[in-house]
Amino acid sequence: MADNRMTISWDTADLRSKLAKVPQESMRQLTSETDKYALVAQNHARTNAPWTDRTGNARQGLFAQPFSDNKSFEIVLYHTMPYGIWLERRWGGRYSIIPDTVTRVSRVYTAAMTAKLADILRGV
């Protein structure tokens, strides 16, 4: 009669250590994605702003700032020049760049965050 026993042993200390790191590592990964797409948004806005920029100040004054608080992640796109609001609003918004950038980048950012969350949940 053959002995069909199998033994599996777990190092629970190592397993607990790895499980404790999952939330911290997950937050780092999501924060990194947010940082990456803030730069994508900033570059898109600066590159595709439709106005003629005589001094370069308005274009270089477009910024995207990533924020995260371990509960939510967001990107804020804004002008630093006082007349930035008029570049966005004047002529019915015909020369605005912020709405276009938000529309375009939010699609890829949302897809990237969804994929990253799926990877995290799968344990990749």
Image (spheres, rainbow, N blue to C red):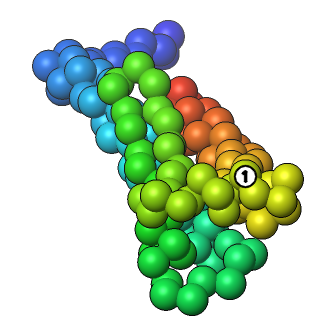
Where residue 11 sits: x, y (%)? 19, 22
Q: Which residue is mark 1?
A: 89
Who's the residue at 85% across and 53% down the image?
A: 92
Where residue 45 sits: x, y (%)? 62, 67
Where residue 9 sits: x, y (%)? 27, 18
66 vs 17: above or below: below
Residue 51: quarter of image: bottom right
77 vs 42: above or below: above
- Near-viewer residue (71 or 3): 71
Who's the residue at 49% across and 87% down the image?
A: 55
Mark 1: which secondary structure?
helix
Residue 86: quarter of image: bottom right
- Near-viewer residue (6 or 31): 31
Can residue 33 be seen here? Answer: no
Who's the residue at 50% across and 43% down the image?
A: 75
Q: Which amino acid type is shown beneath numbered disc 1?
A: Arg
Who's the residue at 73% across and 52% down the image?
A: 89
